[in-house]
Image (cartoon, helix red, strand yellow):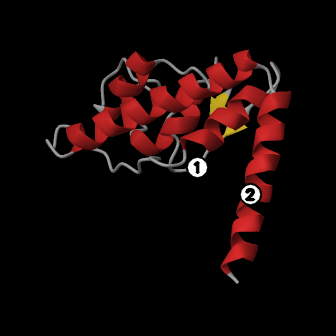
Amino acid sequence: MWHTKVDKVLINVSYIIIFLQMISKKIIQKGFLKILKTRLVEEFLSKEYSKNEIRCPMHLSIGQEAISAGVALNLKNNDQAVSNHRCHSHYLSLDGSLFAMFGELYGKLSGSNGGRGGSMNLLDIDKKHIL
């Protein structure tokens, strides 16, 4: 019984290896950097939120970084992205301004939405990110 489960895992792993060999190293590196950037920012925000300086509700996307990175890598120049309430990862993967994002979270005019939207309403028309 256990060997059939192992066989399925090995088959899945071999598919992943074949798929990764087909993708260029440059795309893999770009995706990894988007994932890493998002994870580091989200972990930082998790610590900052407990200090009660960020006044808006926050839904972190820790563990979901790869989805937004993959979507961002496949968007074309004229595409727009519509996100959900866990929009940090989408915003960051689309190369939204980290300065504008933090401004928005802290309710500052320098925020991506003038400090009015908070964590769940990040917006960057220039980067084609719409919530």
Q: Could you say which is closer to the camera, residue 13 or residue 98?
A: 13
Query: What quarter of the picture does the N terminus occupy?
Result: bottom right
The residue under the point 75% across, 75% down is 4
Is residue 115 something one can see in this rendering?
Answer: no
Above or below for 56 versus 89: below
Disc 2 is placed on an element classified as helix
Does the image show residue 13? yes
Mark number for residue 10?
A: 2
Q: Is residue 106 left or right of residue 4?
A: left
For the point 77% across and 40% down, the residue is: 17
Q: Which quadrant of the rendered structure holds the C terminus?
A: top right
Amino acid type assigned to the residue bearing label 1 in the image: Asn
Residue 103 percent across, percent down from the top left:
34, 24
Q: In the image shown, does 69 or 102 lie closer to the viewer? A: 69
Residue 85 lies left or right of residue 118; in this view the side is right
Badge 1: residue crowd in 10 Å (few <14, some 14–19, many ≥20): few
- Name the residue that disc number 1 marks: 84
Q: Residue at x 72, y 21 (%)?
A: 27
